[in-house]
Image (tube, rainbow, N blue to C red):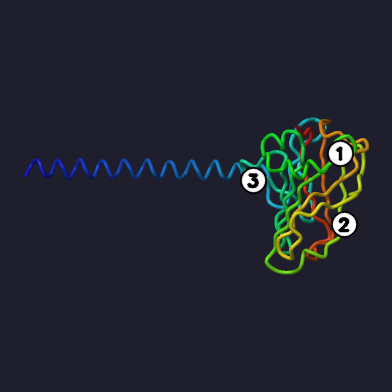
Amino acid sequence: MRRSKAGIIMAAGFFALVAVAWLYLQDQQQVSSGAAAQAVAPGRSASVDQGGSAAESPGAAPSTRRPGTPTYVAEDEGAGGVNVMAAALTPGALETDPSLGDLAAQLDPATEVGFLIVFETHAGDLSKLDLVALSSLDSPDGEHRAIRWVGEDDSSHHRSGMLVFERGGLDLAAPGDLTLTVRDVADVPSRALTWLLPLQ
């Protein structure tokens, strides 16, 4: 009888210890996820001011950065039921993801800069968008206009391809912000996808 009481007490103590440990780990996870959420608040994109500290800039449909996303990728928040993702086709991006090489091979790297753009929606028709006319690129040296679209998939709900800009004075290795703006998609006046420079 004494052994069975001792066994019950030990088992109860063990389960109590496991429960306390589990609650502690849950609490730690909530603290760390809350800190990450505050680092880049929803509806804002992180950029670096001239003093080198993080600053936030508001936008109609700003880009977001999910944990683990490569630095050459930017995404918007899916305003108007359309998600937009863009990848800067830099040498580092091509090294990390060789599947981007087919698109990048259609660029003249001396005179052009390319971005893989992916649009996804479950409503509406994306195939009729004139992405060259609707897009611009802002960098520390000024604004750049898109010059051509190289389509991969131009279906109505899933559209992807490469948006090409003239390189001009554009230097992706210089410090600052790089912002791709796409206007008038799904009744959203402006979508801003932002990268922190330098991009390798």
Q: Amino acid at mark 2?
A: Leu
Residue at coordinates 12% horizontally, 44% vertically from top-left? 5
Instruction: Relative to 61, say whether 88 is above or below.
Output: above
Mark 1 to mark 2 CA distance (whole Å): 22 Å
Please identify the quarter of the rendering in which residue 8 is found: top left
Residue 3 position, x and y percent, is: 9, 41
Q: Is 15 placed left or right of 136 in the picture? A: left
Q: Residue furthest bottom?
A: 124
At label 2, counting other C-alpha atoms closer than 10 Å, the crowd grade (few under 14, some 14-19, many 20 or more) is some
* Front tag of 3 and 1: 1
Residue 140 position, x and y percent, is: 88, 37
Q: Is 10 placed left or right of 96 in the picture? A: left
Which residue matches tag 3?
Answer: 66
Q: Residue furthest left?
A: 1
Which residue matches tag 1?
Answer: 108
At label 3, counting other C-alpha atoms closer than 10 Å, the crowd grade (few under 14, some 14-19, many 20 or more) is few
Mark 3 to mark 2 CA distance (whole Å): 26 Å
Which residue matches tag 2?
Answer: 134
**How many numbered tags mark residues here?**
3
* Front tag of 3 and 2: 2
At label 1, counting other C-alpha atoms closer than 10 Å, the crowd grade (few under 14, some 14-19, many 20 or more) is few
Between discs 1 and 2, the one toward the N terminus? 1
Mark 3 to mark 1 CA distance (whole Å): 31 Å
Q: Amino acid at mark 1?
A: Asp
Q: Amino acid at mark 3?
A: Arg
The residue closer to the viewer here, 91 or 28, is: 91
The residue closer to the viewer here, 153 or 198, is: 153
Residue at coordinates 39% horizontally, 44% vertically from top-left? 22
